[in-house]
Image (cartoon, rainbow, N blue to C red):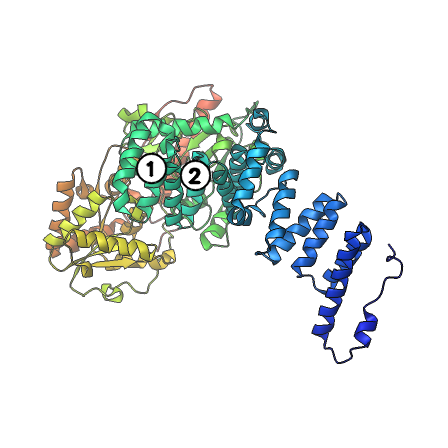
């Protein structure tokens, strides 16, 4: 396009001022083109004006005012998409330029272009304008737009729906969850916050946002989100449980009592309220099942049926599929890695499906190599995952995550394989009728507890928990003096997550310290704030805070070395240590647990019984305290316990991984035989099998 007639060039101005440096010449060019563009636009010569603004931006691409005028011109030309981009650039480059923000907000709202790019600063800087727009535009949309998203799965579909109903907190929340499932937490956070901006009482958005914040250790923010939702009048029964979950992560016990009472009351009214937090609230297996079934119904509503016609033959190897988000540096991976390596390839083909990409961890690399085939399915939709698993001919699909974060619920619900199994990652029932079996033992889930599980119970003869005998342990810093403890002191450690520590058990620990002179309590504290809160709680109970020591996050091999410096691991009730307990025993540190009613509260007992140490299982808090004090006061008893624990590595069932794998394979063959015979899933017990522990490969630290 030609310039307008008689258009002057800035060249003569520059030629008349040879003393100008490059910076001044650039400024002169920008000013010339900008002024000329404004004059041309004023007389409706829009295309020539656009040429001038482009020339100004060529000279200086970061000149926000030129982007603004360019946007105004493009809008008059009805080139709205380009106008939005120009307004956005103007707003980003000049965040205090209210005119750029106003124009972007107005045009973006009119076009349904609100997105995670605009939301953070729009909500922060122009909330009143947005609120007026949303209330005005809400009248244009019908409930049918919201309803049609009920079964939408893909981001593309949700974004299209959002573009037609961007004032809908429901659709914004669905899109946020879609992004969250893709591990795009930053974008998901923006959409959750946007939904809460529209309706601060939206419980599902608060739940999703709290999960993201808690996972990022932004617990203060999560607690504020849950509190804001409650104060906004949320009737969502999940809100108290969210607040409680956030408070316990940071040991904010001043707020725990209020939120816990409200959360339990809500839980008893509506089991959905505690989905994801039930294990930390109550040691009640019946309510745990109710929460799991409520979560199943939520996933079921968003998971269309995918009918399948499975045809299988007994005349071939059984194909096992393991699916998990945790094939990375994660406790589940550190427990089960050796199982994949020891499977009998003459009888089984083993395939892995990863739901979260690994970031290059050693354990993740080892696990990927241990499968016959491994697929990263993190970018696939649930439907695509199901199709792939079926195409791979998987006979038995083992879910290693259950109802934990990023688990394969939407895949298991669609029946990806003829036989589906719940194992290891989630200490409780899936609540899903499409999961046929759960692998347990007689301690964590006795036969008389079957009413609390939707699956058929498969009892292994020793402990349900797999263990890796190749777990790496640092050779450095194994003495208690390396950590600042006196050489002759008694060191109690408590390395479970802080959210497992209740005020009641912490009080017991303080009483134990008071009864064992010269003893210390070594607590795992992922943040400085957690450490400070533990100190404050100890001071309230009259304990000298100098007797508390803190263990921050370390690479796992270095963390495991700490157990050599401790005398006894003090377990937590309601939710025992799982990987923590077996790690301690592997490193020679005895564990004292207290057994409860539900699966999470019985794992410590299962581990200790399989390690040949049943006397370290208490059933009441006074018994727990007295036993800890006895161990703390009796040096010979402590030394004898450590000798027994160290000897158990080469003799006990807990660490006989080859035997464990043979028993697990026996269970898989029984499940598969039942399927081929047309039998419905039914409970069964695996008989004890024998292996020569030292003869099998893989033993060592």
- Is residue 398 shown to the viewer in this render? yes
Nearer to me, 47 or 243: 47
Of the 4 image quadrants, the one containing the C terminus is bottom left
Q: Position of residue 581 (x, y in %)?
A: 28, 47
Nearer to me, 210 or 418: 210
Residue at left offset 41%, top offset 38%: 404
Q: Circle 2 sits on which residue?
A: 206
| Res. 23 image quadrant | bottom right
Residue at left offset 41%, top offset 42%: 210
Of the 4 image quadrants, the one containing the N terminus is bottom right
Residue at left offset 43%, top offset 51%: 329
Going by the image, does 285 lie left or right of 349? left
| Res. 107 image quadrant | top right
Q: Position of residue 244 (x, y in %)?
A: 32, 40
> Badge 2: few (under 14), some or many (20 or more) residues near its Cα, within 10 Å?
many
Nearer to me, 260 or 305: 260
Q: Position of residue 409 (x, y in %)?
A: 47, 33
* Residue 102: image tag: none
**Tag 1, which secondary structure?**
loop
The vertical placement of 388 against 189, above or below, is above
* Residue 464: image tag: 1
| Real-space CA distance between mark 1 and mark 2, rounded to the nearest whole angstrom | 35 Å
| Res. 175 image quadrant | top right
**Tag 2, which secondary structure?**
helix
> Badge 1: few (under 14), some or many (20 or more) residues near its Cα, within 10 Å?
many
Residue at left offset 40%, top offset 27%: 294
Q: Position of residue 477 (x, y in %)?
A: 30, 64
Nearer to me, 73 or 586: 73
């Amino acid at each position: 396009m030609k310039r307008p007639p008689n258009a002057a060039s800035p060249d003569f101005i520059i030629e008349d001022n040879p003393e100008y440096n490059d910076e001044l010449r650039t400024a002169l060019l920008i000013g010339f083109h900008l002024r000329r563009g404004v004059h041309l636009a004023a007389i409706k010569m829009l295309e020539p004006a656009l040429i001038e603004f482009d020339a100004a931006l060529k000279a200086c691409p970061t000149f926000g005012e030129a982007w603004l005028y360019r946007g105004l011109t493009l809008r008059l030309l009805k080139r709205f998409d380009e106008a939005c981009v120009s307004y956005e650039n103007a707003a980003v480059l000049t965040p205090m330029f209210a005119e750029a923000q106003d124009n972007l907000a107005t045009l973006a709202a009119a076009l349904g272009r609100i997105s995670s790019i605009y939301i953070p600063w729009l909500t922060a800087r122009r909330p009143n304008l947005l609120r007026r727009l949303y209330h005005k535009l809400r009248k244009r949309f019908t409930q049918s737009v919201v309803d049609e998203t009920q079964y939408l799965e893909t981001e593309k579909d949700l974004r299209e729906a959002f573009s037609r109903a961007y004032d809908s907190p429901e659709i914004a929340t669905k899109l946020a969850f879609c992004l969250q499932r893709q591990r795009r937490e930053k974008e998901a956070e923006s959409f959750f916050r946007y939904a809460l901006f529209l309706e601060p009482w939206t419980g599902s958005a608060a739940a999703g946002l709290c999960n993201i914040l808690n996972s990022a250790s932004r617990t203060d923010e999560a607690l504020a989100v849950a509190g804001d939702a409650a104060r906004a009048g949320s009737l969502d029964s999940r809100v108290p449980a969210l607040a409680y979950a956030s408070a316990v992560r940071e040991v904010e016990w001043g707020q725990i009592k209020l939120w816990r009472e409200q959360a339990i009351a809500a839980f008893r009214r509506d089991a959905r309220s505690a989905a994801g937090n039930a294990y930390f609230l109550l040691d009640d297996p019946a309510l745990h099942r109710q929460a799991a079934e409520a979560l199943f119904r939520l996933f079921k509503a968003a998971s269309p049926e995918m009918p399948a016609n499975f045809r299988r033959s007994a005349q071939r190897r059984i194909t096992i599929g393991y699916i998990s988000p945790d094939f990375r540096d994660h406790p589940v991976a550190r427990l089960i890695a050796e199982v994949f390596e020891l499977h009998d390839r003459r009888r089984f083909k083993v395939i892995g499906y990863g739901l979260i990409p690994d970031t290059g961890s050693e354990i993740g690399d080892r696990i990927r190599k241990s499968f016959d085939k491994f697929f990263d399915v993190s970018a696939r939709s649930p439907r695509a995952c199901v199709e792939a698993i079926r195409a791979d001919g998987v006979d038995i699909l083992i879910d290693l995550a259950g109802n934990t974060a990023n688990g394969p619920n939407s895949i298991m619900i669609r029946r990806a394989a003829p036989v589906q199994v719940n194992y290891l990652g989630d200490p409780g029932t899936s609540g899903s009728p499409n999961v046929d079996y759960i692998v347990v033992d007689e301690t964590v889930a006795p036969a008389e507890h079957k009413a609390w599980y939707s699956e058929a119970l498969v009892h292994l003869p020793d402990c349900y928990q797999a263990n890796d005998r190749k777990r790496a342990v640092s050779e450095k810093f194994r003495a208690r003096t390396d950590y600042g403890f006196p050489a002759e002191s008694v060191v109690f450690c408590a390395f479970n997550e802080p959210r497992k520590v209740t005020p009641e058990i912490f009080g017991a620990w303080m009483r134990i310290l008071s009864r064992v002179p010269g003893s210390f309590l070594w607590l795992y504290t992922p943040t400085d704030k957690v450490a400070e809160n533990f100190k404050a709680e100890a001071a309230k109970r009259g304990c000298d805070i100098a007797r508390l020591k803190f263990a921050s996050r370390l690479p796992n091999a270095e963390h495991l070395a700490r157990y050599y410096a401790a005398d006894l691991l003090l377990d937590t009730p309601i939710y025992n240590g799982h990987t923590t307990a077996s790690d301690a025993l592997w490193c020679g540190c005895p564990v004292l647990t207290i057994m409860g009613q539900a699966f999470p509260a019985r794992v410590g007992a299962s581990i200790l019984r399989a390690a040949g140490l049943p006397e370290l299982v208490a059933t009441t808090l006074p018994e727990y305290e007295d036993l800890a004090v006895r161990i703390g006061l009796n040096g010979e008893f402590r030394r004898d316990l450590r000798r027994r624990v160290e000897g158990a590595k080469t003799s006990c069932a807990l660490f006989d991984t080859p035997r464990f794998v043979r028993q697990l394979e026996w269970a898989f063959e029984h499940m598969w035989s039942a399927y081929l015979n047309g039998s419905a899933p039914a409970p069964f017990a695996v008989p004890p099998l024998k292996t020569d522990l030292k003869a099998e490969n893989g033993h060592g630290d």
